[in-house]
Image (cartoon, rainbow, N blue to C red):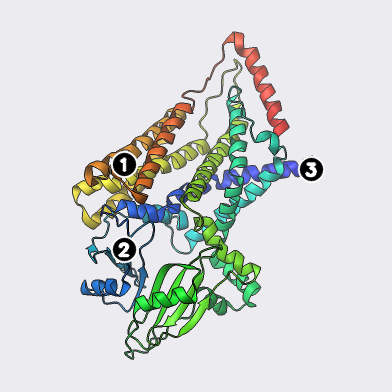
Amino acid sequence: MQQSTHKTLYNTHGWIGIISGILLFIVTFSGIPALFEEELSHWQSANNPVLNVQQQDLDKALLTAQAQGFDHSTFFIQPASEVDGNIYIAHYPEDETPAHIVKINPNNGQVLPEANSDMAELLGHLHTDLHLPHPWGRYLVGFAGMAMLLAIIAGIFIHLKWRKEFVMLRPKRSWRLLLTDQHKLLGLWSLPFTLILAFSGTILGLLGLISPILAVAAFNGDVPKATEAVLGPVATITQEYAPSQSINDFVLKQRHDMPNIEMDFIFIDGLNDKGGFIKFSGNHKSKLSNLESITYKLASGDQVHRGSFVEKGPFQRIFAAVTPLHYVLYGNGWLKLLYALSALAACGLIVSGNMLWLERRHGGKRNADHTKVAKNHWLGQLTLGTCGGLVVATTAVIAASQVLRIFNLGHQQVQWEQALFWGTWVGLIVLPFVYHNSFKLSHFMMRASGLLLLVTLLADGLINGRWLWHSQGWVFNMQCGFLISALLCFYLDFKIPHVREEKASKSATKNLVTTEEQDNRDLDSVA
């Protein structure tokens, strides 16, 4: 590769990371709880989980919901799953009024109270749209994914000596060289997953802009036809009464007609209406597609639409595979864990990249007596406050989802959780600009995050009686995740340097300068 091309790619990689790095960290780190949003939502509810579902009588569940005042004709049904063994029946209004959700134990038909915590949704929405107005927040996330994709591609081309860099770590050399080695190690080992996450995240975030292009490629520019192919036809409500057939019978019919669907949702539009539809949607059991669906008429039972992307052209298959690839809707829990670790590595990649950029421009400056120039760059302060603050705020709201149960706040707990999350994060963003010892602050944030996760486990045991050694299923898995994350925070607190040597002794000055010159030559040779 020519030196000019290499330099262009190198600068592109660096500036993309600097311009979008903090936003990328927010999107990437929040993607970890978003990846486990269903599991977190199940854990945050202190109701005794249904571990062994004996039967799913959806007709009976609907009657139970209707007896509780659920009188909607358009609604969703989420059957019991491996993660959450309860049945959910929900109506989502088109306006801003709250959703009407009924949670039912399928074994005994008992209606369970809604969880007062909204922590999982709070963290999940941070990943999908940054809590910004629709669709601008999602577009911003999509552009962040595109920036990450471009930075990865540029990074691949500038690090052609990847075989050597796969295992190269020189912890006893300079801080700058250590950052370089860590940046390359994290990037190389997490490359397959970060590439998948960046590509799929770009498409999901920019779907509103990409859809017309996909319609041109796959449906000759017919956007309504493309929409119907993905979502299915819309029911025509006639207001003419016609008794709907049994939902349980439709479930059996769906299993016969499309046995390869792992049913996730049932959408009923127009219950007891002559034009009403019932739609089953879910993932393909053996192929990457979450757009498998089949729709019937509620009154007659006739099939009106069958949507499957697994046997279509390349554009449709790629489109159908995006969401399963991004949210790991295939494989098992271990694959999800591997994705989460890769996302965590990507977070380290982003932070080390910003720190390395600062080191190369400010870290090597010395006074006449060879003392380091002490200067806190605003980018370093903003990186520490935003990235470290997000970690602390996330662990704080996870702990609060259980601790606040003591005060019986009811639905007001959601507002308290939101206030705690945003208040903690904003406060820690400002703190590095007031308190300038970045090393002490980074240690404080790591320790605070670890302690908050331990508080979460303690509160879960004391308040809910769900001690780690007595838990089962995904509650146990989530608690193990909290414990491991706490230990990781304490490990990083132990490994991160506590101080940076600002002044070398006179006898060591010559050797120190020589070492830095050698490190700079090493960096130039591997860059």
CA–CA distance in space, label 3 to label 2: 63 Å
Lower position in the chain sequence, tag 1 or tag 3? 3
Which residue is under mark 3?
1
Residue 393 visible from this viewpoint: no
Establish if 145 lies above or below 377. Answer: below
The x, y position of residue 527, in whole percent, is 69, 35
Q: Residues within 10 Å of mark 1 (few under 14, many from 20)?
A: some
Give the quarter of the image for residue 169: top right
What secondary structure is marked by label 1? helix
Establish if 122 lies above or below 189. Answer: below
Which residue is under mark 2?
54
Give the quarter of the image for residue 64: bottom left
What secondary structure is marked by label 3? loop
The x, y position of residue 41, in whole percent, is 35, 55
2 vs 1, front mark = 2
Establish if 320 lies above or below 191. Answer: below
